[in-house]
Image (spheres, rainbow, N blue to C red):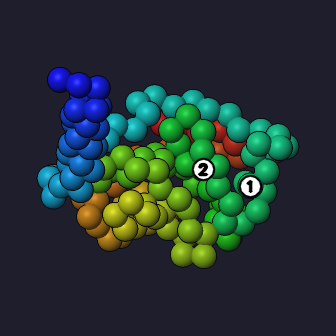
Amino acid sequence: MDRKEFLSQIGMSAAGIFMFGCLGGCSKGGNAVVTPPAKVNLSIDLTASANAALLNPGGYIYANGIIIAKTVNGQYLAVSQMCTHQGATVVYQGNNNQFYCSAHGSLFNSNGSVANGPAASPLQQYNVAVNGNTLTITG
């Protein structure tokens, strides 16, 4: 086997592996099991620049596998950041007061319950307490 033939076979093998991975990611298999953080006790300093988004209605941040959001009414929400369908990261849509997964279109209500699939299981919801400039997320 000469060098050109060897490199050609390596390239074809790599292409096959790549295609298998792509096609496998788009399979119609069942919902993946996504495990949210088991025990949570997290403090968020609202004066820290990394958390500035939480000062604005509709803003959100990610911390330790949790998405923390501020509603347009000024309440704080905290749910698991991973969609229960296949584990993609959800975002908060403040204008709709919902969490959205752009990977496959699942929508979740503000309490984490499923509003629209393909996700069949709710997002894990966490308790949020406000004390001055500190949010405490537990669950």
In depth, the one of 61 and 15 nearer the eye is 15
Image coordinates of residue 61 in percent, x first then y, are 64, 49
Left or right: residue 84 compared with residue 108: left
Left or right: residue 7 compared with residue 70: left
Q: Which amino acid type is shown beneath numbered disc 1?
A: Ala
Report, in whole angstroms, how far the alpha carbon at label 1 lies from the one at label 2: 10 Å
Could one spot residue 14 in this view of the protein?
A: no
Residue 36 lies in quadrant: top left
Image coordinates of residue 110 in percent, x first then y, are 49, 63
Q: Which of marks 1 and 2 is nearer the N terminus?
A: 1
Q: Which amino acid type is shown beneath numbered disc 2?
A: Ile
In depth, the one of 11 and 70 nearer the eye is 11
In this view, the residue farthest toward the front is: 2
Above or below, 13 relative to 29: above
The nearer-to-camera label among 1 and 2 is: 1
Residue denoted by label 2:
68
Above or below, 130 relative to 109: above
In depth, the one of 69 and 25 nearer the eye is 25
* Residue at 22 percent of width and 32 percent of height: 5
* Residue at 21 percent of width and 52 percent of height: 23
Q: Dot 2 lies on which element?
A: strand
Image coordinates of residue 80 in percent, x first then y, are 46, 46
For label 1, the crowd category at 10 Å Cα-Cα, with few meaning under 14, some 14 to 19 and many 20 or more, is some
Residue denoted by label 1:
53
Above or below, 17 relative to 70: above
Could one spot residue 139 in this view of the protein?
A: yes
